[in-house]
DNA sequence: CCACTAGCCCGCCATA
DNA sequence: TTTATGGCGGGCTAGT
């Protein structure tokens, strides 16, 4: 199986630690597969390369000397491009060095490449015109600057990861540890969930907190045009704790139960009941994080008459028990 | 942990 | 012909 040639963009304003974390992680995808599974790698692997405008060594923002592998001209058409976070002061004009790499990204995308960005790296994608009239995310401190510079971009700063465009070939990541979320998303998408879980363990990435959303975004959470389904989703956001919300959604929609199910699944990728369960578990996560309510009380709150129902649904969706989830979360906040 | 049931999913075919 | 929908029935599983 063909490995994905992957270009990571290095500019003097790029975040060096992000770049090297990404290079390390992608290099190790599939590496121990044969040892672990006793068979040659089934999933796709990545061949990451650090590219700069001219391929010559440069000094990053902290004065550290970085030596790229090649220039962008030497790799006109990679399978995947990753633009890491850029240290830009909001409101500053775009540096001149963005010109060539922006043009290169534009051509590569037209050629079929998948383009992704971390945090403020989204400006390069926006400058290339890839984000016009599309949803995108960036670092929360940078979202105003992005929408000012590029008014056509629909900035969703609350989102961690947004795949968009034809074939989801444009992916923007924003927020605190979003490069990790981007890694897990890409590995999950191209190498499968098994390998994504392994990498998450090895590199101590946290797929259960923010990363959970990026796994969900593969199937759920996608944008769609079906207003009937959207209405149902809006209604469900308020009424997920009702008893048998699915048949209520169906009858409210005016469609037959059969038709509603089909429409819903096509639009969201999830069945209505899976969607309801996701809402219930998400709300339970919120309550575990922000309140001292017992798991039993939370179960009742989100619509389960038996606490055991929440426990099993939680474990299935999150991969942890509710109790462990709360403990892990409080541990993280204590640590800062 | 297990058994029961309502609620839900989906293949299939007819319809428009 | 292709595409979206509704009805039926059997089977599954989330929830009790």
Image (tube, coloured by chain):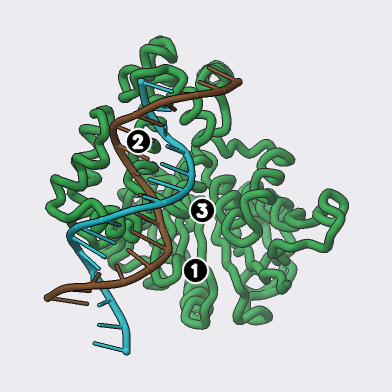
Chain colours: A green, B brown, C cyan
Q: Position of residue A314 (x, y in %)?
A: 48, 29
The residue that label 2 is drawn on is A279
Disc with the residue nearer the chain's start (3 vs 1) = 1
Q: Nearer the viewer's eye, disc 2 or disc 1?
A: 2
Who's the residue at 47% across and 68% down the image? A169
Left or right: where A57 falls relative to A262 = right
Marks 3 and 1, how far apart in space? 16 Å
Which chain is disc 3 placed on?
A
Out of A134 and C16, give the one closest to the viewer: C16
Between disc 2 and disc 3, the foreground one is 2
Tell me if residue A104 comes above or below residue A115 in the rendering: below
Q: Tell me the quarter of the image containing the N terminus of chain A.
A: bottom right
Above or below, A245 relative to A14? above
Query: Against A20, is A73 above or below?
Result: below
Dot 2 lies on which element? helix
- Which quadrant of the rendered structure holds the C terminus of chain A? top right
Task: Name the residue tied to disc 3.
Answer: A118
Chain under numbered label 2? A
**Left or right of residue A13: residue A31:** right
Dot 2 or dot 3, earlier in sequence: 3
Question: Does label 1 lie on the same chain as label 3?
Answer: yes
User: In the depicted view, which residue is nearer to us: A313 or A268?
Assistant: A313
Q: For residue A211, say whether it is visible.
A: yes
Left or right of A31, for residue A53? left
Name the residue tied to disc 1: A98
Residue A30, position as x, y percentages in the image: 76, 57
Query: Few, some or many C-alpha atoms within 10 Å of disc 2 (few <14, some 14-19, many ≥20)?
Result: some
């Amino acid at each position: 199986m063909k490995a994905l040639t992957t270009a990571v963009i290095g500019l003097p304003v790029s975040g060096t630690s992000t770049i090297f974390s990404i290079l390390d992680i992608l290099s190790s995808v599939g590496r121990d597969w044969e040892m672990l599974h006793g068979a040659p790698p089934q999933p796709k692997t990545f061949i990451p390369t650090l590219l700069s405008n001219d391929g010559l060594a440069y000094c990053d923002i902290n004065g550290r000397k970085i030596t790229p592998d090649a220039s962008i001209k030497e790799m006109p058409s990679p399978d995947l491009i990753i633009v890491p976070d850029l240290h830009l002061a909001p409101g500053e004009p775009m540096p001149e060095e963005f010109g060539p790499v922006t043009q290169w990204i534009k051509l590569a995308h037209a050629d079929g490449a998948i383009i992704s960005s971390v945090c403020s790296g989204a400006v390069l994608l926006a400058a290339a015109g890839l984000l016009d009239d599309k949803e995108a995310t960036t670092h929360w401190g940078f979202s105003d600057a992005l929408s000012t510079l590029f008014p056509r971009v629909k900035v969703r700063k609350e989102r961690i990861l947004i795949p968009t465009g034809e074939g989801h070939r444009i992916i923007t990541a924003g927020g605190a540890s979003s490069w990790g979320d981007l890694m897990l998303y890409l590995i999950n998408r191209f190498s499968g969930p098994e390998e994504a879980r392994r990498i998450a363990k090895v590199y101590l990435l946290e797929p259960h907190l923010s990363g959970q959303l990026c796994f969900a975004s593969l199937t759920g959470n996608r944008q769609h045009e079906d207003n009937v389904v959207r209405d149902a989703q809006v209604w469900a956001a308020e009424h997920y704790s009702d008893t048998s919300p699915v048949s209520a959604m169906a009858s409210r929609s005016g469609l037959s139960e059969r038709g509603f199910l089909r429409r819903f699944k096509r639009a969201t990728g999830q069945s209505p009941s899976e969607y309801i369960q996701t809402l219930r578990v998400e709300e339970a996560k919120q309550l575990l994080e922000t309140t001292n309510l017992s798991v039993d009380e939370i179960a009742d709150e989100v619509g389960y008459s038996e606490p055991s129902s929440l426990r099993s649904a939680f474990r299935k969706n999150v991969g942890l028990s509710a109790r462990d989830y709360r403990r892990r979360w409080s541990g993280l906040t204590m640590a800062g």
